[in-house]
Amino acid sequence: MNTPLMQTISIYGTVDAQKNATFVSQRITQRFKTNNIRASFAPGVNRLMKLSYFISKDQSAPTTEEPTGDNILKAIGQVGYITGDDEIKTFRHEVISSERGAYIKVYAENSDVFSHTIDTQVTIEFINENDNTTA
């Protein structure tokens, strides 16, 4: 089977009230770049759930602090997270990871008094091994 050019990493889970959680993808064995981010925020979240996206070399999943790695929204943005209420946010966002064996991590901060579910996807595009693109 040929290696695909692009794949979507789906991350889904629940974050307890006033807690944080880190969700980790499977190991990505090739160099890649992020292509698209999509996040669904249920009614009643009221922008009390923040989602941050990381590229990391390890698979640790801390709950008390942000995970290791590069926050891909913080590079040039005012804040390093997205939030919402009763909406789906979809946007193109390209960050190159020249490392093989990296992980995509989503760090969710729930400051609400209710538990909330996260439903987010990150689409990545694999970088051809003959491409000299670097991060």
Image (cartoon, rainbow, N blue to C red):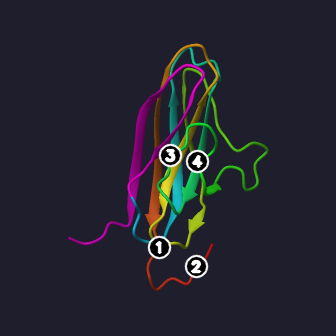
Magenta segment boundaries in residue numbering:
1-26
Secondary structure under tag 3 reads loop
Indicate the amino acid at tag 4: Tyr
Residue position for label 1: 127
Residue position for label 4: 53
Q: Which numbered dot is residue 80?
A: none
Q: Left or right: 85 with respect to 8?
A: right
Indicate the amino acid at tag 3: Ala
Indicate the amino acid at tag 1: Ile
Residue position for label 2: 133
Number of other residues with Cα within 10 Å of mark 4, as a class: few under 14, some 14 to 19, many 20 or more: many
Q: CA distance from mark 1 to mark 3?
A: 26 Å
Q: CA distance from mark 4 to mark 1?
A: 20 Å
Determine contact: label 4, label 3, CB under 8 Å: no
- Of pointers 1 and 2, the one earlier in the residue sequence: 1
Residue position for label 3: 61
* Picture coordinates of residue 7, whole percent (x, y): 38, 57
Determine contact: label 1, label 3, CB under 8 Å: no
Q: CA distance from mark 4 to mark 2?
A: 22 Å
- Of pointers 1 and 3, the one earlier in the residue sequence: 3
Secondary structure under tag 2 reads loop
- Of pointers 4 and 3, the one earlier in the residue sequence: 4
Number of other residues with Cα within 10 Å of mark 3, as a class: few under 14, some 14 to 19, many 20 or more: some
Please report the residue visible at 55 percent of the width from the left and 73 percent of the height from the top: 98
